[in-house]
Image (cartoon, rainbow, N blue to C red):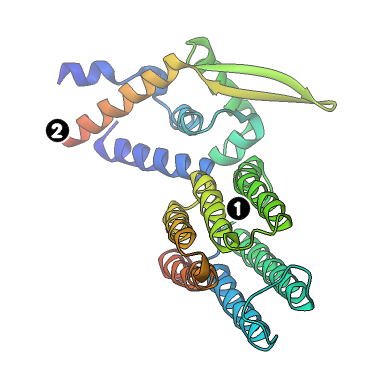
């Protein structure tokens, strides 16, 4: 075999290792959109609290229920957009959307996220509201970090960023809202844009 | 130079075999269909190459049933992983030397 043959072998090995262990069709655009939804949702929540006549939230008011609804809408819209755009991109790349690889990716993402979500509901029931924003950031960051093994490595840095923001936010309980806005809003937009220009625009 | 050639493993001297090992290096296991799709090989082609790798104990084969469908899973053995790393290092050296 000639040198070119060996070189071709090595580059083929690399592609196979990546293709078989990482799901590369994650859409950057969906990250940008998720960030925008988060910002709109946060602005709406801010407006609600400002107009409620109180400076803070109580658990069983209408305002609180509206904010929960607001959060659910943001989540559903973000996940819906991500599924839609990622499926589209996977089709274009001729990648399968539902194989053992994506299953592994999803379980490694959902398990920490679900554990965190349930934990947050439990402490909300104990009337501890101050850490909600911090905990959401922290568990989301851990979920991203865990899932990053099976997809584009850059997600890992978004995970680290969310974890750090979550920890700082835990130190300043009164500012949870603003950290949430930075983490879920601006960071999604920034990372989504980076991913978009790095992978999607080719 | 002799040393380098020594570490080039004859068992990997085919792109399908090299491909099988590459996939199994980064995944716990892979089944027949997955490998076939990734490598773009035919059934018979893949079967003969997996058999060759199995013979030298570089990969392990697990047969099971999922529902009523037979499913064959391939797993790289420790020996196979070690040999593969040696082979790749030898390849790299070979390219650098020239």
Vertical side of A111 occupied by A176: above or below: below
For the residues labelled 1 and 2, the Cα–Cα distance comes to 37 Å
Vertical side of A180 occupied by A131: above or below: above
Q: Quadrant of residue A4?
A: top left
Circle 2 sits on which residue? B97
| Residue A54: % across, % down | 66, 82
Which chain is home to disc 1? A
Quadrant position of the C terminus of chain A in the picture:
bottom left
Vertical side of B95 occupied by A27: above or below: below
Query: Which element type, helix, strand or loop, lies under badge 2?
Result: helix
Kindly identify the residue that appears in the image at 51 percent across and 29 percent down: B24
Circle 1 sits on which residue? A95
| Residue B65: % across, % down | 78, 22
| Residue B91: % across, % down | 27, 30
Question: Label 2: few (<14), some or many (≥20) within 10 Å?
Answer: few
Q: Nearer the viewer, residue A86 or A53?
A: A53
Kindly identify the residue that appears in the image at 42 percent across and 70 percent down: A197
Q: Quadrant of residue A53?
A: bottom right
Q: Nearer the viewer, residue A43 or A200?
A: A43
Q: Are marks 1 and 2 in contact (CB under 8 Å)?
A: no
Q: Is residue A51 left or right of residue B66?
A: left
Do badges 1 and 2 share one subunit?
A: no
Q: Is residue B98 left or right of residue A137?
A: left
Kindly identify the residue that appears in the image at 58 percent across and 58 percent down: A136
Quadrant position of the N terminus of chain A in the picture:
top left
Question: Label 1: few (<14), some or many (≥20) within 10 Å?
Answer: some
Query: Which element type, helix, strand or loop, lies under badge 1?
Result: loop
Kindly identify the residue that appears in the image at 55 percent across and 28 percent down: B28
Q: Quadrant of residue B79?
A: top left
């Amino acid at each position: 075999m000639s040198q070119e043959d060996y070189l071709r072998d090595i580059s083929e090995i690399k592609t196979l290792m990546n293709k078989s262990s990482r799901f590369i069709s994650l859409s950057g655009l969906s990250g940008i959109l998720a960030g925008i939804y988060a910002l709109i949702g946060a602005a709406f929540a801010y407006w609600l609290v400002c107009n409620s006549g109180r400076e803070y939230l109580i658990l069983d008011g209408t305002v609180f229920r509206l904010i929960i609804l607001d959060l659910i809408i943001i989540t559903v819209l973000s996940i819906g957009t991500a599924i839609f755009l990622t499926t589209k991109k996977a089709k274009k790349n001729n990648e399968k959307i539902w194989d053992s690889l994506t299953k592994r990716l999803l379980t490694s993402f959902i398990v920490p996220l679900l554990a965190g979500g349930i934990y947050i509901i439990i402490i909300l029931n104990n009337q501890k509201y101050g850490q909600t924003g911090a905990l959401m950031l922290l568990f989301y960051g851990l979920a991203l970090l865990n899932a990053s093994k099976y997809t584009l490595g850059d997600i890992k840095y978004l995970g680290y960023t969310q974890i750090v923001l979550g920890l700082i936010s835990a130190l300043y309980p009164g500012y949870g809202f603003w950290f949430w806005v930075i983490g879920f809003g601006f960071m999604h937009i920034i990372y989504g844009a980076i991913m978009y220009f790095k992978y999607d625009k080719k | 130079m002799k040393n380098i050639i020594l570490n080039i493993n004859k068992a990997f001297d085919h792109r399908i075999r090299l491909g099988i090992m590459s996939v199994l290096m980064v995944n716990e296991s892979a089944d027949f269909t997955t490998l076939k799709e990734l490598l773009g090989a035919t059934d018979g082609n893949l079967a003969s190459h997996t058999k060759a790798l199995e013979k030298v104990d570089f990969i392990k084969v697990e047969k099971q049933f999922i529902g009523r469908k037979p499913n064959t899973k391939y797993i790289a053995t420790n020996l196979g992983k070690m040999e593969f790393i040696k082979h790749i290092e030898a390849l790299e050296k070979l390219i650098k030397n020239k």
